[in-house]
Amino acid sequence: MESLRFLSPKEIDDIRIEFGTPVFVYDEATLRENARTLKAFPNAFGLKPRYAMKAAPTAAIIRIFNQEGLGIDASSAHELERAIRVGFGTESISLSTQQMPENFRVWVDEGVSMNLCSLNQIKIFAKICPGGAVGLRFNPGLGSGGTNRTNVGGPASSFGIWKGDLEEARKLCKEGNLEVTRIHTHIGSGSDPEVWKKVAGMSLDIVKEFPDVLSLNLGGGFKVGRMRGETSTNLGEVGGPVKTAFEEFAAESGRELLLELEPGTFLVANACSLVAKVQDVTSTGEDGYRFLKLDAGMTEILRPSLYGAQHPIILLPEDRETPTAREMEQVVVGHCCESGDLLTPSDGDPEALATRMLPEGQVGDSCVIEGVGAYCSAMSAKNYNSFPEAPEVLRREDGSFALIRKRQLLDQILDNELIP
Ligand SMILES: *Cc1c(COP(=O)(O)O)cnc(C)c1O
């Protein structure tokens, strides 16, 4: 049987009793350690680390990163407001959004930095804030996301200003009297130092075209291995070549650039586990499958259904006294009336079902899904089948458990409905 990443079987029993299932459990020690690792990223002339809060935006989580001295990368004005309410200073927030808020001028005046992500955004900004300082997000033409749906660079990605439109972007900024002080490329660089070196080089080539740029933002997208045996990004290793590239750029141009980074996944992915329960077991016969049905599913974790993402699944018998059940191939599914609500898709292919070797599951067993800190609670099919949003709990550094988001009530689901 696979071992648990940070919870003990005893803690899982306690969590079930105190909070019920399904429940997300975050580990404060891991969150803080990841923040410190990020702050130690090799850099030549300074580093501004931020947390891409769309990965997990709960107040208690972003408060921890605030205490650790990280800034925020917000992807909408709503996220920005959430960060401010938790105590982030506007000057620590960078907004890179696919949808410019109507009132963005207010935020710019308050000190939020904006990364303009399209030619149209430059036009809008220039009209409302002529003479302002901006960042520009470019798509350098290269991407390395794991799947089509996680790729955020290259010709199939809509994010950022296409590299071929650089001249047009420069012209629009000039016309609007905008000072370009930051360049941003977020392509999902993975864990390969060679790719990081290449991305840094391509991004520095863009910086060359903008003489007022003071900082280069390489985004996030650091690969994190969720399954055992998968590699995670070693920041020291990928940061070395980046640092060298900045130093070489400085030697050539006399410009000492600040490095900005804004990972989401890296900071939170493996800092959270979902504790769920097997609430039914069905089978499609000898030539079919044995299905374990959880009391959680796409209402908590959409990544398997969207990307064919693989997460560790650990089954713990309800009755610890009985000898450990024999292992067999089983399919783990969620609780929604939806065939796509599948927790064991084929690797990278959400269309295909796969099995997992797990102890023969029984109704009542605990089922822990790990590596669910990033883009799970934050990106679920919330309220589908009218299941309430699951609670979130923080395991404090002293080992105690604190509720950081309550289980949603039916009344809250219905709150905005009106019958005319
Ligand atoms: C989502 C996002 C990130 C974080 O990406 P991860 O893969 O979670 O590290 C960083 N920057 C921008 C602009 C983003 O949209």
Image (cartoon, grey):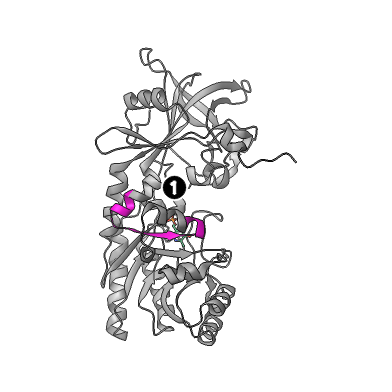
Q: How many marks?
A: 1
Report the residue at 51% width, 40% height from top.
Answer: 301
- Which quadrant does the N terminus fall into? top left
In the displayed structure image, the side of residue 48 where residue 206 appears, left or right = right
Q: Is residue 97 magenta?
A: no
Report the residue at 39% width, 83% height from top.
Answer: 212
In which quarter of the view is residue 388 placed?
A: top right
Q: Nearest the camera: 179 or 118?
A: 179
In which quarter of the view is residue 89 placed?
A: bottom left
Question: Where in the figure is residue 78, as x and y percent of width and height?
Answer: 51, 56
In which quarter of the view is residue 239 placed?
A: bottom left
Tell me: residue 327, above or below residue 152: above
Observer able to see residue 281 = yes
Q: Is residue 74 magenta?
A: yes
Question: Where in the figure is residue 180, as x and y percent of width and height?
Answer: 44, 80
* Range of magenta residues: 64-79
Tell me: residue 207, above or below residue 188: below
In the displayed structure image, the side of residue 121 where residue 188 appears, left or right = left
Ligand 1: does it lie within 8 Å of the C-beta at label 1?
yes
Report the residue at 26% width, 54% height from top.
Answer: 36
Q: Which residue is mark 1?
A: 374
Question: Where in the figure is residue 359, as x and y percent of width and height?
Answer: 44, 23
Tell me: residue 323, above or below residue 410: above
Question: Where in the figure is residue 200, as x and y percent of width and height?
Answer: 38, 71
Q: Nearest the camera: 196 or 419?
A: 419
Q: Which residue lies most toward the front here?
A: 420
